[in-house]
Image (cartoon, rainbow, N blue to C red):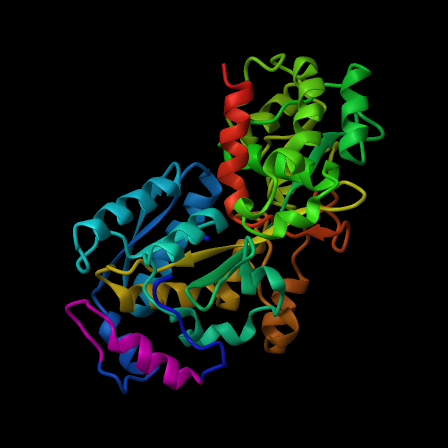
Amino acid sequence: MIIQRFKKTVLTTAVCLSFALSTVTSAQDANVNATWDDLLESAKGQQVYFNAWGGGEQINSYIQWVANTVEEKYGVSLTHVKIGDIAEVVSQLQAAKAVGRDSDGNVDLMWVNGENFAAMKNGGLTWGAFARALPNTKYVKDTPSIKFDFSVPVDGLESPWGGAQLVFIYDTEYLKQPPASALALLEHVKAGGRFAYPAPPDFHGTTFIKQLLIELSEQSTALASPVEQADFEAVTAPLWAYLDQLHPLLWGNGESWPASAAATMQLLDDAELDIALSFNPNEASAAVKNGQLPETVRTYVFENGTIGNTHFVTIPYNAKAKAGAMIVANFLLSADAQARKANTEFWGDPTILDVSKLPAEDQARFEALDAGPWALPLGAGKTLAEPHASWAAALEQAWLERYAN
């Protein structure tokens, strides 16, 4: 998810590095004529604190593998600071900015989503267009969700890390024909079907109600613009009418909610729900391989598509180890790191690389990956654009006012 704005013309790597490195504030400053080799040398021995969600065992293990690898390859020490909600880190940065703490910050790299990136960009909390200077950027896909994060221009201020899409997971042993739209889901629940979603502001819960809003609103085109430019009540009225019908029929009767998307998968495994939520098209495969779900599960999306986006990493304006953070961000874009991350044995997070741009031996690594029948089939289902970042907070607040106990 700015004070600093940069020209949108494509710069050469050398020029980008000169700009980026001229503003490094660590103890190992690079000069304005630095090359990537100079940056590698400057980063040696730096300690990079990577603030990222710590609620997933596979993700934590993957980040530890990254830490081990960058230490061995580049001499950069990476520490995963496990966070429950990255918005808390954004608040800390806002407080630091307010008191003028412009250097020696304790956050060097962050895993962010669109809503938090928008807050950082608007508050001048990002460092600069570092992503344009990363050598591995040349392998990244050229897609709208990489150029715009929740409709907010990225402008090189964050580097893509992985792809995501809202998906539904069901067990074919109990559900033969899953509902293929929001209205079909409501009919399924009215007929006795079992469903639940996490309460906003949980990320998956908020994403689910955004999905419903896109499908149900007669003014869905307004979602691409800031929420203050729309008639919020008129745009969202069909959503609240839908949820008023849905909630009393849910697991928990609209009075209690699953703690997370992972909790919906546990309830699916316990045969208490027919459908679970995820924002990873391959998550069911990883869950089956880890014994968390039965082999009878399958993944699907609604017939008219579901929300998808790209998640990123960014460097805060006052990071202490900017050079080291750039080295880590570039490694996260490498074929080695992306292929491992896409492997459901380790994580199963879809790659943001254009595999056709890679050398033949690296292409073969991706082609060899097999998520099995449990993942969303490649090319299945349209990906819908996220609403503008400002809609998330407005929807969460309205939801809490209506339905929080």
Q: Is residue 1 magenta?
A: no
**Residue 322 coordinates in the image, percent (x, y):** 27, 65
* Depicted 378 relative to depicted 190: above or below: below
In the image, farthest residue toward the left: 27
Q: Residue at x 63, y 69 (%)?
A: 355
Q: Residue at x 64, y 15 (%)?
A: 251
The foreground one among 102 and 69 is: 102
* Depicted 223 relative to depicted 16: above or below: above
* Depicted 272 relative to depicted 119: above or below: above
53 left or right, relative to 79? right
Q: Residue at x 46, y 45 (%)?
A: 59
Please tell me in which quadrant of the rendered image residue 399 appears: top right
The foreground one among 334 and 212 is: 212
Please tell me in which quadrant of the rendered image residue 241 appears: top right
* Depicted 186 relative to depicted 92: above or below: above
The answer to whether one can see residue 349 in this image is yes
212 left or right, relative to 227? right
**Residue 231 coordinates in the image, percent (x, y):** 61, 40
260 left or right, relative to 100? right
Q: Residue at x 53, y 61 (%)?
A: 338
**Residue 390 coordinates in the image, percent (x, y):** 50, 46
Report how many numbered discs are placed on residues in the image.
Answer: 0
**Residue stretch rendered in magenta on the structure:** 12-30
The foreground one among 43 and 314 is: 314
Q: Is residue 17 magenta?
A: yes
**Residue 101 coordinates in the image, percent (x, y):** 17, 55
The answer to whether one can see residue 174 in this image is no
Please tell me in which quadrant of the rendered image residue 210 appears: top right
